[in-house]
Image (cartoon, grey):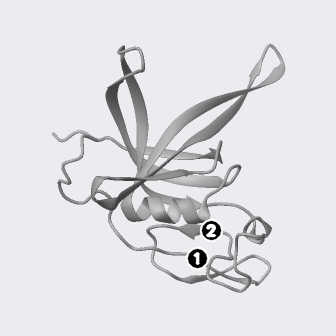
């Protein structure tokens, strides 16, 4: 039987995506994502936050750098990847990251209206998707919203990268 490596997260960006370019002009974006859960402990409400390191490659990285920003609520699908590296002192360290395969920007319509959005453009709406086909939805109030779409498959083929 095949194994499954699938991660689904809904959380808030802890920082703006950091976009960099590797050999061959391959773009990679990374940022921390916070997910929180609330539970009762001894009759008191307690919130626990978990931080996840998110990595996006190529076209997905470019879209993330353009549309994502600190504090934005986002739905991410991807897979876990653990890699090792040597720190400045030469000590081998390990880190586990979520390699994103798709994301949707979540939130209220007003969340998309600001200095970084084009008024009346295709990026105003209740959700923006980096993999879903483009379409128009109607909200409960009867307002039409359109979803941002970019259609591609992430990390297709062997690119020779160690990740």
Q: Position of residue 106 (x, y in %)?
A: 64, 60
Q: In front here: 144 or 148?
A: 148
Of residues 26 and 117, which is closer to you in this image? 26
The mark tally for this picture is: 2
Density class for disc 2 (Cα within 10 Å; few <14, some 14-19, many ≥20) is: many
Q: Residue at x 18, y 41 (%)?
A: 2
Q: Position of residue 105 (x, y in %)?
A: 60, 61
The numbered mark at residue 147 is: 1
Q: Nearer the viewer, residue 13 or 62?
A: 62
Q: CA distance from mark 2 to mark 1?
A: 6 Å
State the SS at label 1.
loop
Looking at the figure, which quarter contains the N terminus? Answer: top left
Q: Position of residue 81 (x, y in %)?
A: 34, 36
Relative to 119, residue 68 above or below: above
Say whether disc 2 or disc 1 marks the residue closer to the N-terminus. 2
Determine whether, in the image, residue 107 is placed left or right of residue 152: right
Quadrant where the C terminus sits is top left
Q: Which residue is mark 2?
A: 127
Whole-percent x, y for residue 57 in the image: 38, 55
Q: State the SS at label 2.
A: loop
* Vertical position of residue 120 compared to residue 36: above or below: below
Residue 131's tag is none
Farthest residue toward the right?
44
Left or right: 34 as drawn, with respect to 159: right
At 68% across and 70% down in the image, what residue appears?
A: 126
The residue that appears at 17% across and 53% down in the rendered structure is 158
The answer to which quarter of the image holds residue 119 is: bottom right
Circles 2 and 1, Cβ within 8 Å, touching? The answer is yes
Q: Decide: few, some or many residues near mark 1? Use Cα within 10 Å; few <14, some 14-19, many ≥20.
A: many
The answer to which image quadrant residue 47 occupies is top right
């Amino acid at each position: 039987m095949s194994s499954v490596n699938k991660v689904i997260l809904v959380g808030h960006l802890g920082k703006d995506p950091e976009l960099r370019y590797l050999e061959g002009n391959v773009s990679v974006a990374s940022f921390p994502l916070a997910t929180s859960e609330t539970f009762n402990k001894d009759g008191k409400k307690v919130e626990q936050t978990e931080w996840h390191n998110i990595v996006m490659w190529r076209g997905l990285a470019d879209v993330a750098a353009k549309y994502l920003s600190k504090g934005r609520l986002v739905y991410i699908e991807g897979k876990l990847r653990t890699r090792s590296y040597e720190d400045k002192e030469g000590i081998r360290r390990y880190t586990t990251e979520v390699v994103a395969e798709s994301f949707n920007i979540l939130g209220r319509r007003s969340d998309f209206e600001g200095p970084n959005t084009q008024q009346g453009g295709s990026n105003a709406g209740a959700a923006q998707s980096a993999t879903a086909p483009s379409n128009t939805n109607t909200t409960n109030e009867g307002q039409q919203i359109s979803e941002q779409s970019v259609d591609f498959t992430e990390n297709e083929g062997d690119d020779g990268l160690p990740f």
